Amino acid sequence: TPAPSAAAAPPADVPMDADVWAALPDDLLLEVLARVPPFLLPRLRAVSRRWAAAVPRGPAFLAAHAAAPSHGPCVLAFARGGPAPAHCAALSLPLRARYRLPLAFLPAWDLWLVGSSGGLVCFSGFDASSVFRTIVCNPLTQAWRVLPEMHHNQQRQLVLAVDRKLRSFKVIATSDVYGETLPTEVYDSKADRWSVHQMMPAENLCSSKMAFCDSRLYLETLSPLGLMMYRVDAGKWEHIPAKFPRSLLDGYLVAGARKRLFLVGRIGLYSTLQSMRIWELDHGRTVWVEISRMPPKYFRALLRLSAERFECFGQDNLICFTSWNQGRGLLYDVDKKAWSWIAGCASQLCNTQFCFYEPRFDTSIY
């Protein structure tokens, strides 16, 4: 058998001469820098004055960064309520590394994590005067703003949605966290104001978890049974009579890519018969179709007690599970049908909240 040729061997890492980097045209240099993982870019500012001027806020760089492929999914962890001040970190799934995101630029208020979309992160909470506030920020650029007060300004269930094509975002406010029904309000960053819309025609929500996909907001409800769907473009609620699977103990709605909507929950009344399953909504037939079951070894490791709580969140056909007693997160890739553990998702530490996060320098808070 002939020996493998030198061309078949993997290329060795050869450092590029500094003169070659210095001679790169500006447009080519920006194309290279735009593909560097966002968490590593601030370190490159020390390379030269030329790089410091381009990274990460120069308009030419932001344009190249916006056109470059996404870094990939990250898990954002926001810890609050412990002896240390609230802090944030991002676990990069492509790099398998954890990066601290300082929050010292935000007001020292009592904040909760609402969620993330398109590079922005939303928090809500009470300011020093006990007034309910909503904050939207870009953790990478440390740009932030406090949104105007809502017409019915009290602690509400909120969802953040970024539209990259229109370079804008919306925040949707439904009922308050205690279940009181209030008119739906939508904040539009272009208009910089809240608009009041239809009150949600549901009497009994069975979960505070919401899912936003394809410009629609979904909530689970028991009365009427099924889902309530809010069309952002029309400003109206609709009832979807999709019955829940039998023996469902706890269910989470999870938004997938494009129009895909998933339901995640435990099935079974007794601990020896319980299992975790994932369904997808068939929009045409208005039924939940089972697409996966968590393997028993993962289920037993995730939930050691039958009554133990778990949390679940998703983005772009990735679903992540966390639980109080498990220091790792369990990731399920819907497209690849693959399960895997990821480190850095210890929800028992300081009342930690999680969501998926896409690091972007080009997403504006306006």
Image (tube, grey):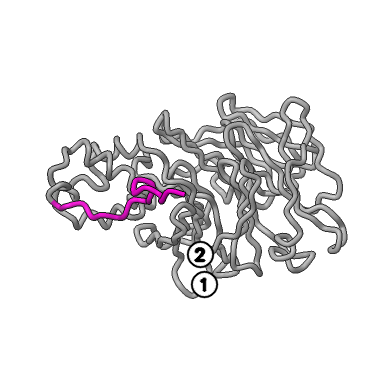
Foreground pick, 322 / 141: 322
44, above or below 288, in the image: below
- Badge 1 marks a residue whose secondary structure is loop
Tell me which amino acid carries mark 1.
Gly
Outermost residue toward the bottom in this view? 83
The picture places residue 1, in percent across and down from the top left corner, at 47, 49
The picture places residue 247, in percent across and down from the top left corner, at 86, 50
Q: Is residue 229 left or right of residue 276?
A: left
Q: How many marks?
A: 2
- Give the CA distance from mark 2 to mark 1: 8 Å
Quarter of the image with the C terminus is top left
Q: Residues within 10 Å of mark 1 (few under 14, many from 20)?
A: few
The residue that mark 1 highlights is 82
The picture places residue 203, in percent across and down from the top left corner, at 76, 41
Residue occupying image coordinates x 71% and y 48%: 264
Residue occupying image coordinates x 47% and y 44%: 149
Tell me, yes or no, whether the highlighted magenta stretch contains residue 10. yes
Q: Mark number for residue 18?
A: none
- Magenta segment boundaries in residue numbering: 1-18
CB within 8 Å, label 2 to label 1: yes
Q: Residues within 10 Å of mark 2 (few under 14, many from 20)?
A: many
The kind of secondary structure the magenta stretch mainly shows is loop
The residue that mark 2 highlights is 79
Foreground pick, 102 / 263: 263
The picture places residue 68, in percent across and down from the top left corner, at 36, 37
Tell me which amino acid carries mark 2.
Ala
Q: Is residue 115 left or right of residue 319?
A: left
The answer to whether any part of residue 212 appears in the image is yes
Foreground pick, 300 / 226: 300
Residue occupying image coordinates x 59% and y 64%: 328
